[in-house]
Image (spheres, rainbow, N blue to C red):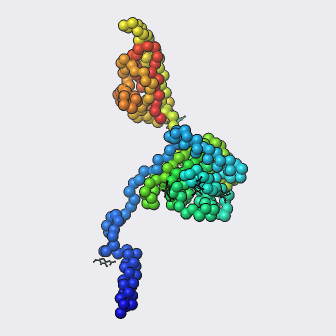
Amino acid sequence: MKIALLLTILLAFIALSFACDEFNPNISTIGECTATQKVSWKPTDNAQVLTPADLDPQELGMHEERMAYVLAIAKQQNKKFVASIYHQNGTLMCLGVNTGKPNIISHGEIVAINNCTALHGITSFTNYTLYTSGEPCAMCSAALLWADFKTIVWGTFNSDLLCKICMSNIPMDSSYIFGRYYGLRASPPRVIGGVLRTEADAWFGSYCSKPTSIYYIKPQCVCTNTTSPLKIDQTRYSSWFENGKTVSQFGGIITNTGSVTVTNPTFTSSPLRPNSIWGLAVDETKNTWALQWYPVIQPGQTFSFGYIIDGEDQIAFQPTA
Ligand SMILES: *[C@@H]1O[C@H](CO)[C@@H](O)[C@H](O)[C@H]1NC(C)=O
Ligand SMILES: *[C@@H]1O[C@H](CO)[C@@H](O)[C@H](O)[C@H]1NC(C)=O
Ligand SMILES: *[C@@H]1O[C@H](CO)[C@@H](O)[C@H](O)[C@H]1NC(C)=O
Ligand SMILES: *[C@@H]1O[C@H](CO)[C@@H](O)[C@H](O)[C@H]1NC(C)=O
Ligand SMILES: *[C@@H]1O[C@H](CO)[C@@H](O)[C@H](O)[C@H]1NC(C)=O
Ligand SMILES: [Zn+2]
């Protein structure tokens, strides 16, 4: 009798546990959306990528030292992609070199992760930082999210590898993957790109003129000028004495030297302020200047401004990119 009861309870448990696995829209708990709705992802921003300029000198120094080590191993073994993993207590736990072995997906990051597991039995990397000579590819970025790395640091950017040096890669910034962390974990990794960028870029070299290299690919990229096409020329027309001090009048001409119309340009300036100005208007909270009227400059066209200021020094205006 007792055994029959126990058996019934056991069977009930088994039945329940199977029932949980089987999705029945009539009785299962629905997460988001109803059973009859089509589901898709919420739009999500890419992860923020910090650069050396965002770090305090002490932290940057540590990352540079570790990146220098990764690059030294790379040069010693004559391999482009090398990764290292440090515990948060500062201990170097393992290295990974992409030697193309045992197969084509043995990227430095994957090799380093597998090495750490083999050497130290680490299965989750919550308290670890990964360094890599080149930004993680789409495959490795996803692997690093799964592995739960707290911090990820690289030298050369994927976009530079593909677009500037014609090296085959999946055309995706790792920040795209890292920004989608919420399907796996509560917070994104801390992502730092461009540590010893110049040295890492130099080590990757260029494949653009080596179409027979295994690394070569013809890039398909979008190029955007980082410097403004606006050129500013200023002239001091005159200076005079007024109430015991020198006052000067300046005239300025902004020229669009590029091939594309510039709309709503802004300018930064030295802290000098004019007594009066026409053509430009300041936003004191942002310390930037905007065009005072019709803020559109066609290619080859100009926009004029002028001001009167104490002293004989001009205000140094700089177009923001
Ligand atoms: C859900 O309910 C509908 C309507 O009552 C029924 O036709 C359908 O078979 C049920 N689905 C399942 C998986 O039980
Ligand atoms: C840091 O942590 C790792 C992993 O637990 C351990 O192997 C290593 O000995 C530790 N190092 C120091 C200096 O505490
Ligand atoms: C694994 O890491 C260790 C320790 O850093 C290193 O000596 C070794 O070469 C690495 N092995 C592989 C296969 O990269
Ligand atoms: C990571 O380190 C913190 C202390 O800094 C500790 O509380 C936590 O348990 C560690 N996590 C893992 C997965 O080892
Ligand atoms: C980018 O800069 C080049 C010269 O540096 C110029 O010829 C070109 O017109 C610029 N492109 C745009 C969109 O301004
Ligand atoms: Zn990879």
Q: Quadrant of ligand 3?
A: bottom right
Instruction: Name which residue lies at 43% across and 24% down.
Output: 271
Residue 313: x and y in percent read 46, 16
In the image shown, does 39 or 198 lie closer to the viewer?
Answer: 198
Q: Is residue 286 above or below residue 177?
A: above
Seen at 33% across and 70% down, the residue is 29
Question: Residue 151 placed where, x, y %?
Answer: 52, 51
Q: Residue at x 66, y 51 (%)?
A: 80
**Nearest to the observer: residue 103 or residue 92:** 92
**Residue toward you, 93 or 139:** 93
The answer to whether 13 appears left or right of 256 in the picture is left
Residue 48 position, x and y percent, is 47, 47
Name the side, left or right, on which 40 lies relative to 173: left
Residue 78 versus residue 115 in the image, above or below: above
Tell me residue 76's x, y (percent).
72, 50
| Residue 126 shows in this picture | yes
Whether residue 201 is visible here, answered yes or no, is no
